[in-house]
Amino acid sequence: MSFRATLQTIVEGVEGGFGAIIMGYDGIEIDAFVRQDSGFDVQLLAVEYATVLKEVKNTVDVLKSGALEEVTIATGRYRILVRAVNDDFFVVLLMSSDGNYGKGRFLLKREVPALLAGLQ
Amino acid sequence: MSFRATLQTIVEGVEGGFGAIIMGYDGIEIDAFVRQDSGFDVQLLAVEYATVLKEVKNTVDVLKSGALEEVTIATGRYRILVRAVNDDFFVVLLMSSDGNYGKGRFLLKREVPALLAGLQ
């Protein structure tokens, strides 16, 4: 399955899913699936948060906290769920603030092996 | 109820809770409750992550995403749950990676009004 198909499975599988992106800590996107009606510039958000993610990863590494697994950020307008794929890449799911948060986390975790396989 | 008593309620109310701290985005702690047997330097972790939190908050503000509500970070060794109290302060809960994540989120959210009352 292509990256995009896997990302589409995630976004369409969760109520309130706006889009999903697989990208590197350097901010460069590999692939994305974004709903046309999301009303968000999902790509812009992902790039902005990639900087934050890099900072989180550095802190986790410095503190010898084991591998970074998951980061979530909830604001008044949306939720961002991030799951590490490997040491270089992560997948981001953007969803509405009233979307099904638990389902989003579950789908991201479930699809990591498929994304990882595509990176080999 | 004092800040410390509220923080203790949170930490002791969740399986796997190590400690909780109320602090500012400037990295200065107001109060903390840390279990003696946690095996973590909870204060050091909180200070390190305060820098990350400040970065997250800046990004959220720049992107006009509404107020920052919650941030969670999961690593191989622990989970950090952060809940905004107001625009200047937040509360951090450090717990084991196999602790009750949902309960931790619930308790943080439930106790925000008590912490907020203490800041008035």
Image (spheres, coloured by chain):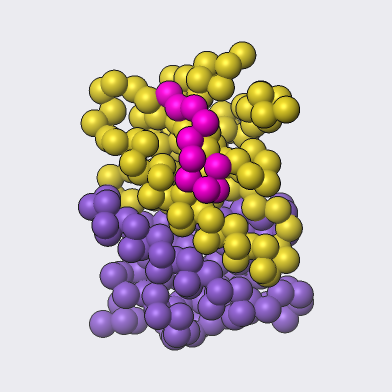
Chain colours: A yellow, B purple
Residue A21 is at least partly visible in this image: yes
User: Could you tell me residue B30's position as x and y percent?
Assistant: 44, 85
Quadrant, the C terminus of chain A:
top right
Q: Residue at x 35, y 43 (%)?
A: A45
Task: Give residue A64's position: percent from left, percent from top.
Answer: 72, 66
Q: Which residues are magenta?
A: A24-33
Position of residue B14 relative to residue B1, above or below, is above
Residue at the image position 33 percent from the left and 41 percent from the top: A44
Q: With B61 as the anchor, is A43 left or right in this view?
A: right
Q: Residue A30 in magenta?
A: yes
In screen coordinates, is A24 left or right of A75?
right
Residue B7 at what x, y percent from top left?
51, 75
Q: Quadrant of the N terminus of chain A?
A: top right
Side (left or right) of B58 relative to A107: left
Pick the residue in front: B66 or A88.
Answer: A88
Helix, strand or loop for the magenta stretch, by majority: strand
Q: Position of residue A79 (x, y in %)?
A: 39, 43
For the point 59% across and 47% down, the residue is A70
